[in-house]
Image (spheres, grey):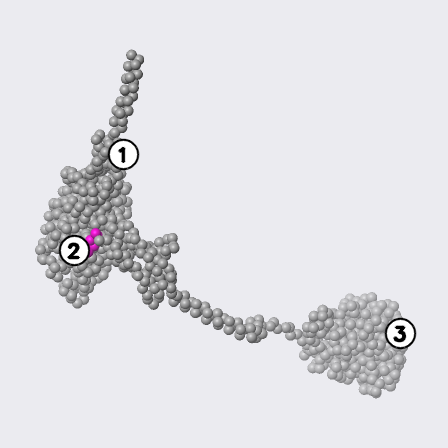
Amino acid sequence: LLTLSLPVSVLLLAGERILASAAPICVHGQAGCHFLSLADLFDRVIQHSARMHSISSDLHSEFEQYVLPSRNHIGRINRHCHTATILTPNGKENAQRLAREELTEVILKLLVAWKDPLWQFHQNMVHQDDFNNFSSNKALEMSYMVHELRKGVEKVADKMQHLGMISNSLSGLSSPEALDTSSDTSGESQAMSDHDLLYCFRRDSNKVQNYLKILKCRIVPENGC
Amino acid sequence: MMWRDVGVTLILSLILPVVAQGARHTPPGKPKLTSCRSPDKETFTCWWEAGSDGGRPTTYSLFYHKENSETVYECPDYHTAGANSCFFNKNETSIWVNYNITVVATNALGNNFSDPVDVDVVYIVQPHTPENVTVGVLEDEDGPFLRVSWEPPRKADTRSGWITLIYELRVKLEEAEEWEEHRAGQQKMFNIFSLHSGGVYMVQVRCKPDHGFWSEWSTASYVKVPDYIPRERSMWILIAVFSAFIFLILTWIITLNRSSVKHCLLPPVPGPKIKGFDQQLLKKGKPEEVFNSLVVQSFPPRSTDYEDLLVEYLEVYVNEKQELMPEGKDLRDVGCLKSKSQSDNDSGRGSCDSHTLLMEKCGGVESKDESSYEEPELLQGQAGSWERLERGDSQVVDTPDSSDARVKTWPLVFSPSIHGSSDNHHYGTLEMPKQHSTSEITYSVPDHLFPTSTSFPHHHHPEYRDSLGEYSEYRHSRSPSTGVLYHWEAQHHPQAHSNFNIRNLERQKEATGLGLPPSRSMEYVEVQKVNQENQLVLKPLSSHGRGPSQVQFGRAVVDYSKVNGVNNDNVLLLQRQREMAEAGQYCDYREKEGAEAERYPTQQQGKTTKDGPVATQLQESTCLTTSGYVDTVPTMPTF
């Protein structure tokens, strides 16, 4: 089964332009599969997160430019992102003080927390007239990217674990965590307005990108650090 | 009282300004936050500008509170960043947190709040300029190039990955106006190529975080490029010199071989190759001569079928002058039966048609006009047959001058173009060689008339024989046979020239030697042969022992029928006339076709010419003299 899945995974990997999350990584250097170094993996996920953040910034700007003037700004101060419950380092020292595993965990938490709200947002946008088709496509792409980025980060974590760089405490991150976070934030996410959602997501995507960069320069500091 | 009012007014006037002045002090104007910047994403500074101070010393204070928190904090540091600024250090700076900042201006009279500003440090990052910008000139095979290198600003922590900077540099020649900008990405080194040799360049670098503001340009670095010749230019110079050299050589070669090159490129136009065409003659501008020269002697081509060239018998006879003369005169009076073709050179008709006798006379009249005409020698009262055939000018030549000999001009056969032909055909004189015992009459006939290959059919017309004591035989004979009479069939060649000149080789005097009766006797001549010059060599029948005793010089015996004409069927229209010449002048002469005269089919013309030879029509006007003989009617082809 593994041998059959490997060629398929290679094809998927070749087709994957942004993230190599679909293909299994040959951590052990098996023959017949494409070997990606950790640095390459990091570069890929960082690129992916950068693109995700730029899309979210565009959407937020559009929203503020075209939609917001018709509404009041009173609710801004009381903005409350549903991911506020996730403790994230708010500074460089704070981020550097975190362990690799914790930092990776935070990243994954954030990505997990945003999957459903973004999908919901996209669904809402299709039915609304606030956004044009271009924005709707961006929202769709955003939700898709979150999903892909999460899988990529999981791959990186697996690799790091294989390389012994991090401990295996992350293995429990998959479904239980996701369920927890979604359950925690599900109620709150519904209360968010579209503008708040975009604002929050823009910020969180920036955090993800930054954390990944820190992680990369801490673990594989060869290029660009 | 009035003094008191004045005093109060004075006092009031003194006090009021003071009071009023106190009233000018107002609460401070509204301050305004101008910008907040973070150089490293770890600290940040905000600046504000003061409003009006209201006349009183005003203090400014900055207050902020973080998002989702009501705790208001005041700016920790007002001095580090300068006046009207607030510096947030690391401990107080939280990233990804929204700061709500407000500046308050306070003076003795009141305070004034600025508008709040939301600040997230992540989005206000503006790094310092890159440091240690170095520019060096390096060499490689293509020439020198600039290498610029720099370092990130000290404060920005790129090593930990906290900040990611992208760089940009710009270059220009010192004297140039516009900068040339290049994006360098995250690299800290850049190469610049294609330099002006000997120029001085200025280089500047700046940077920006991935989400933030551009830094200021670094201070300019100057660099001088050494002098050099670009390899590319030197190669082109070499190519240009080489090709110029080759071009000169080619030009020289072509100049040496100018003529042959010209001959090759512009081949000379071949001139016309027409036989007999004389270009010089053409240049002189005499077209007639030129075109005449074009007439080839051999043209028209000899027909192999000489059947068409039916030549009737040539009737040569010598008439008595006396008899003939009046006739001739009559003829002249009446009008000469001159073929009209006289004026028509193209007709090829004999100038005189069948009434040859008559024509002779006519011709004789005209002949004198002919310039090229030679007076035939006439047999004087001899039976010599004189024929003078005028050349084809359709002039029936007749030289009846001489006395007795009647020269009959044979209608010349054809024509006109004989001008250019050989001189042989020119004359119409009959010359009689003296030396010959027999009179030979040479007829010059064009080749086409007497093609050697064919022989004329030989016909007898018994009728004539009967009617005529002397029968006129119409015989076609080409080669010299015994035929005397020739009937020339119309020529199918348009240019059949009736250039036969019958030369009467006999002189008059000699004619007597022939035993021919003088003058009015008719002598048949036998064509002996056709010599090379297309001359019919005739022999008088007498010499050869003419068969039929045609030679009857007795006039009375002779009964000739005049030929009225030849109709379209090449039928000789004979006129039955038994009378002597003098006796009757029957101008029964009719028109050819409509002639009532009996028609006697002339001898068959072998083959009529293809064009349907038409005998020259006798002229209506002419009236035949009653010569009573039948002349051969040369059928002249009318063309």
Q: Nearer the viewer, residue A15 or B16?
A: B16
Q: What residue type is labelled 2?
A: Leu
Q: Residue B224 carries which label?
A: none
Mark 2 or mark 1, whichever is nearer to me: 1
Query: What's the residue at 72%, 79% (across, down)?
Result: B447
Determine whether A131 is above or below B138 in the image.
above
Q: Which amino acid does label 3 sit on?
A: Met
Query: What's the residue at 85%, 72% (across, down)?
Result: B365
Determine whether B160 is above or below B320 in the image.
above
Query: What's the residue at 18%, 38% (across, down)?
Result: B63
Please rate how many residues cluster around mark 3, counting C-alpha atoms within 10 Å: few if below 14, some from 14 to 19, many from 20.
many
Query: Distance from label 2 to label 3 (Cα)?
Result: 153 Å
Asked if one can make out residue B73 in the rendered structure from this viewpoint, the answer is: yes
Which residue is label 1 attached to? B52
Specify whether A59 is left or right of B565: left
Please report the bounds of the magenta region as a residue range: B155-160
